[in-house]
Amino acid sequence: MPVPRHVAVIMDGNGRWAGKRGLPRTDGHAAAERAIHAAVEFGGEVGIEFLTLYAFSTENWSRPRLEVAFLMRLLSSFISRNIDELDRKGVRLRVTGRFGDLPKKQRDDLTAALERTSGNTGLTLVLALSYGGRAEIRDAAVRLSDRVARGELSPGDITEETIASMLYNPDIPDPDLIIRTSGEQRLSNFLLWQSAYSELYFTPVLWPDFDREHFQAALDDYSRRGRRYGGLTS
Ligand code: IPE
Ligand code: IPE
Ligand code: MG
């Protein structure tokens, strides 16, 4: 099977990585940057078109205020430290999630980075920020009902495609492969609609330790899978 077009990663285990070293959880988040860098570089090299990284969920707002604030600052510093190189490599940055939930500074930094890289044609790096699969489906339902209320759409005409077209990034294909690090085997509200037929890959490796060899192992595993989509072929 060819390289997956779209790989989505649940980058989990930063806190445990730090805990094992007697460090504060925030050091684990800081250590995640190297793994992100490696994943983007490797993804581009092997020809992945879309790499979605689950960086902050709608539920993560319930973490201690200082941890949330640290993660937001880290987002801005990640952008400022990496944007030149990402741009040079032709990476196109995009976001998914409730963008409006983010603090103004992070919205501004992201907006500038999105605009700067919007014409790039290499790997599309999608950052899932304040992202929740249920929130995304709920937001789509609101948009759909609004169109019905305006008389632009009748309920009987609503298809799966109509719903998909109301999601945050309807032009991005569903993920072929979803990787979750840290040994947890759940989706934690990630891409609920889009993951209907995704291949799932779980590894005990903690996200800050996830390197290109681990990524290659996930791709090798994926290449041995038979995707049937409910049918009988392949
Ligand atoms: C993932 O690491 C990063 C975010 C959710 C922001 P965690 O912070 O969840 O790390 P663990 O799961 O506590 O080890
Ligand atoms: C999922 O990790 C969210 C991200 C990686 C951003 P969590 O650590 O928040 O998930 P749970 O709480 O273990 O399900
Ligand atoms: Mg976690």
Image (cartoon, rainbow, N blue to C red):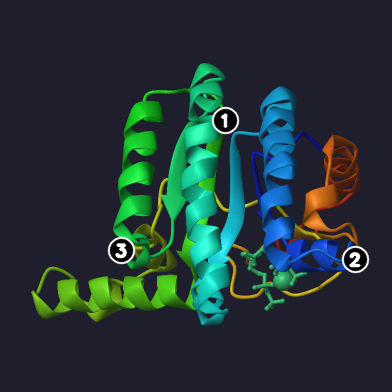
Percent position (x, y) of residue 148?
A: 17, 77
* Residue 43 visible here: yes
Q: Amino acid at mark 3?
A: Gly
Q: From the viewer's perspective, is residue 220 above or below residue 73?
A: above
The residue located at (39%, 62%) in the rendering is: 167
SS type, badge 1: loop
Label 3: which residue?
A: 100
Q: From the viewer's perspective, is residue 85 above or below residue 207?
A: above
Q: Residue furthest top?
A: 88
Percent position (x, y) of residue 157?
A: 28, 71
Residue 20 bears which disc, if any? Answer: 2
Q: CA distance from mark 1 to mark 3?
A: 25 Å
Q: From the viewer's perspective, is residue 188 above or below residue 231?
A: below
| Picture quarter with the N terminus | top right
SS type, badge 3: helix
Label 1: which residue?
A: 123
Horizontal side, residue 219 vs residue 136: left or right? right
Residue contact at pointers 1 and 3, CB within 8 angstroms: no
Which one is closest to the eye, mark 1 or mark 3? 3
Task: Give neighbour class at mark 2: few <14, some 14-19, many 20+ (Cα, 10 Å).
Answer: few
The residue located at (44%, 50%) in the rendering is: 95
The residue located at (59%, 68%) in the rendering is: 190
